[in-house]
Every structure is written in structure tokens, then in C-alpha cells.
Image (cartoon, rainbow, N blue to C red):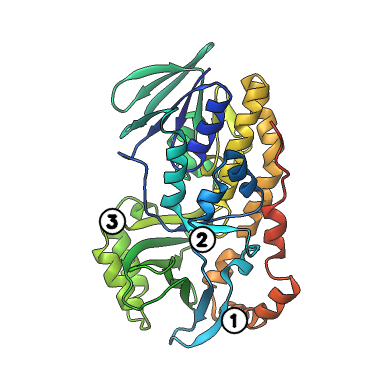
């Protein structure tokens, strides 16, 4: 069968790899001109590690592991509150879980399938017309082609989902925060560590992914309504963050200056996607397009890898309608358990009140003891490994 996959980040190439192995003809369309490099570091934990192992790339991915040793929490004045192992916070397992730059993972996945799969870069789906025998797809470039199935792996703001299921707003669960991420020079000499600064409703971070001359900067604010007007307006994004952090000390002026000068600012909301079904007719969704858990969960990449593996395996066993149903039945409880990890994530990063910040700091003071006893991150460890990978 011929399948079109929209999106060449993580879920898309993973699905492409498995479907090609099962004998499918695969085309991947990606609106960017090439596979996207860079990006902030991501985590791979639990069940998802098994997917990488079965793809034969676990060691290649592990070789890119960053080894972040410390996450330091500081007060508004820069006083250290506590320093913790960041993996323990999210339920990580030392020596097993992997943290690596997102661009390194996407490059490994692309190199795995680039010679076996057709890629259409700098293009996107414009229209989808389902027929009895397939889906007629018109691309933004003007070309028209027919496919047996279309799979949306195009992220939180999925174009495939919009065309098939309707506006994003009906599936979005906004978690009350927006953020800007960007890179800046590592003038502070940080290595394998992160530093986070918090006041009520505001969070800032400097993150050193390894020992390099580059830092990742993050500015996050609580906001009752999603900043829809700012999502595609760079000047409005800079103005929003500048106004929210005006007058603050610590490294905030450095971060604001870096954001204004950066050419790689990534601005978005902390939202989840909650859908009653992930497929309609001959179109299905995977990864963030189907069930984005938000970065508060730390599990977006892992759930994308697992979902792609399961969907390909079910399609290899069944007709597409049965496969779509079985894919959901197999993975939905796993996805929901990992989405639940995001509940309360905002209160850890940027509590909205002084009382909430005091409570968070008190929790940080006992976190080392909780880590030694196994209580810290227990829910994360359980959710990360909540699914035993089927053998296809």
C-alpha cells in the first residue's frame, strides 16, 4: 500500500521505518526545507527505549546522551534553594534513560530511512479528499497524488488534524502557560547542568546541554488564556516576555537581550491534545498530533516513538480500519498515563502565588530524601514503562 506521512520529526520517520520494513511504499512530506536540526534536549525513557532497540539505533542514540548532572533552583535574588538530579524529578532511571538534543535524534532517524523512503521537503498538505479506494491529496506546491492512507505526524498544531477533524481548539487542553525558547552564548561556563529562576507565575532557565559554547534559554509565564495573537508574531512574543520580566535581576536581562537577538526563538503554549478518536476514515494521527502531553510531562518524544511503532505493527497485521482501532486500544492507556504526568507541572515550574512558591520550595528541600527512598519520580517511572511492547 501507499501511505503519506505528514511530518519528518520523530513520529513520522519512525513510522516510515517500520512500514517500509513491512513492505509499504512510504512518502513523507515536511514543510521545512530539510530535517530540522537544533532544538532543545529531549528525554527518552521506559517503553520507548525498546522501540529504539528494535530499530537497531539504541546505541547510536545513547552515544548522544548529554549526561546532565545537576538542576539548580534559585530564588528571585539568585540564592540557591536546592540542586537535584533532573532525571530523578521526572522518574528517570540512571544509566538507562537518554537525554539528547532533539536535532541529533531526528538526524539519526532520517539517516535510517532516507534511502528507502520518498521525502517531499518544503511542501505541505493543502487538501484531503477521501474516496472509496484512497485519499486524493493536493499539496501546497500544486501537485496532486493519491494514497491509500494518510498519517498526520505533524505536531501539536497539526495541519492534518485540522483538515480531517476540524479546528484545534476543540481538542486542546491549555495548561495555563506559554514559553519562549532560544539559544545564547555560554558566557557563564556552564556544563552538563541547568539553573532555574522562579517568581510567582514566571519561570526562567539557563540550560547547558553538555560542555559547549551554547546555552538554551527559556522564559515561561502563567497566562489564563492562550496567547493566540502572539503565536505567529515574533515582535508580539518579544514584547510579551519583555513586559512580563521587566525590572527583574539575576540573569533575566541577559536572557531578554538574547531573545531579542536570537534567530531561533521558539514560542508556544503548554497544551495537550485530547481526542476521543485518533483516526477518521483513511486518515490517522500519531505523536503530538494525536495526543501531545506537553513538555511538563517530559514524555512527548517517548509516546511518539511508541505510538509510531504500534501503529505500523497493527497495519502490518490487519486491514487499516481494524489496525486503527487496535492501535488506539493498545496505546491509549499508556498515553493517558503519561499525559497525567503534566498535571501539576506548572506548579513545580512557576507556581502562580507566593504560597504556591513557598510550598514548592519546601518540597524541594525534602526532594533529596525522596529520591533516595524512591518516592521522587515514582509516578513517572510507572507511567514511562506502563506498556509492554507488542512483538510484531
Residue under pointer 2: 176
- Work out whether residue 166 can be spotted: no
Mark 3 or 2, closer to the camera: 3
Total labels drawn: 3
How crowded is the residue under tag 1: few (<14 C-alpha within 10 Å), some, or many (20+)? some
Q: Which residue is label 3 attached to?
A: 234
What is the distance, in whole Å, between disc 1 and disc 3 at their CAs? 33 Å
Q: Residues within 10 Å of mark 3 (few under 14, many from 20)?
A: some
Residue at image position (31%, 56%) is: 264
Residue nearer the viewer, 59 or 133: 59
* Quadrant housing residue 367: bottom right
Relative to the observer, which residue lies in front, 369 or 76? 369
Q: Would residue 302 be found to the left or right of residue 193 on screen?
A: right
At horizontal 47% and vertical 71% (from top left) the residue drawn is 192
Q: Do the residues labelled 3 and 2 touch (CB within 8 Å)?
A: no
Percent x, y of residue 328: 67, 35
Q: Earlier in the sequence, mark 1 or mark 3?
A: 3
Front residue of 145/22: it is 22
* Disc 3 element: helix
Please give the name of the residue rendered at 70% of the width and 52% of the height, measured from the top-left corner: 385
**Vertical position of residue 386 compared to residue 55: above or below:** below
Compute the Cα span from label 3 to label 2.
Answer: 20 Å
Q: In this view, does 157 lie to the left or right of 236?
A: right
Where does the image place residue 280, in percent across and percent down from the top left? 57, 26
Residue under label 1: 361
Give the number of the disc on residue 2.
Answer: none
Amino acid at each position: 500500500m501507499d501511505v503519506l506521512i505528514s511530518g519528518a520529526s520523530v513520529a513520522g520517520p519512525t513510522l516510515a521505518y517500520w512500514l517500509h520494513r513491512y513492505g509499504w511504499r512510504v512518502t513523507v512530506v515536511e514543510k521545512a526545507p530539510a530535517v530540522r536540526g537544533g532544538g532543545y534536549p529531549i528525554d527518552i525513557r521506559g517503553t520507548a527505549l525498546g522501540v529504539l532497540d528494535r530499530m537497531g539505533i539504541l546505541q547510536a542514540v545513547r552515544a548522544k546522551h548529554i549526561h546532565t548532572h545537576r538542576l539548580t533552583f534559585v530564588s528571585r535574588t539568585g540564592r540557591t534553594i536546592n540542586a537535584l538530579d533532573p532525571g530523578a524529578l521526572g522518574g528517570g532511571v540512571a544509566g538507562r534513560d537518554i537525554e539528547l538534543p532533539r536535532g541529533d535524534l531526528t538526524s539519526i532517524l532520517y539517516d535510517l530511512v532516507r534511502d528507502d523512503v520518498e521525502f517531499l521537503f518544503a511542501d505541505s498538505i493543502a487538501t484531503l479528499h477521501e474516496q472509496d479506494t484512497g485519499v486524493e491529496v493536493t499539496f501546497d506546491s500544486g501537485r496532486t497524488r493519491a494514497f491509500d492512507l494518510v498519517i498526520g505526524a505533524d505536531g501539536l498544531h497539526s495541519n492534518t488534524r485540522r483538515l480531517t477533524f476540524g479546528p484545534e481548539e476543540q481538542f486542546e487542553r491549555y495548561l495555563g502557560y506559554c514559553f519562549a525558547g532560544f539559544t545564547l552564548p555560554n558566557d557563564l561556563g556552564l556544563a552538563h547542568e541547568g539553573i532555574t529562576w522562579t517568581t510567582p507565575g514566571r519561570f526562567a532557565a539557563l540550560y547547558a546541554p553538555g560542555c559547549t559554547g551554547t546555552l538554551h534559554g527559556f522564559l515561561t509565564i502563567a497566562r489564563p488564556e492562550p496567547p493566540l495573537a502572539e503565536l505567529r508574531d515574533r515582535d508580539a512574543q518579544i514584547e510579551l516576555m519583555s513586559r512580563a520580566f521587566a525590572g527583574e535581576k539575576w540573569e533575566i536581562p541577559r536572557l531578554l537581550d538574547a531573545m531579542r537577538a536570537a534567530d531561533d526563538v521558539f514560542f508556544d503554549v503548554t497544551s495537550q491534545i485530547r481526542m476521543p478518536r485518533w483516526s477518521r476514515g483513511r486518515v490517522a494521527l500519531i505523536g503530538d498530533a494525536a495526543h501531545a502531553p506537553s513538555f511538563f510531562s517530559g514524555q512527548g518524544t517517548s509516546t511518539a516513538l511508541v505510538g509510531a511503532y504500534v501503529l505500523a505493527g497493527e497495519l502490518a497485521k490487519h486491514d487499516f480500519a481494524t489496525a486503527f482501532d487496535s492501535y488506539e486500544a493498545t496505546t491509549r492507556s499508556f498515553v493517558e498515563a503519561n499525559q497525567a504526568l503534566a498535571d501539576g507541572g506548572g506548579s513545580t515550574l512557576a507556581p502562580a502565588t507566593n504560597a504556591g512558591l513557598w510550598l514548592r520550595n519546601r518540597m524541594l528541600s525534602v526532594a533529596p530524601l525522596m529520591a533516595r527512598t524512591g518516592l521522587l519520580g515514582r509516578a513517572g517511572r510507572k507511567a514511562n514503562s506502563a506498556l509492554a511492547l507488542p512483538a510484531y
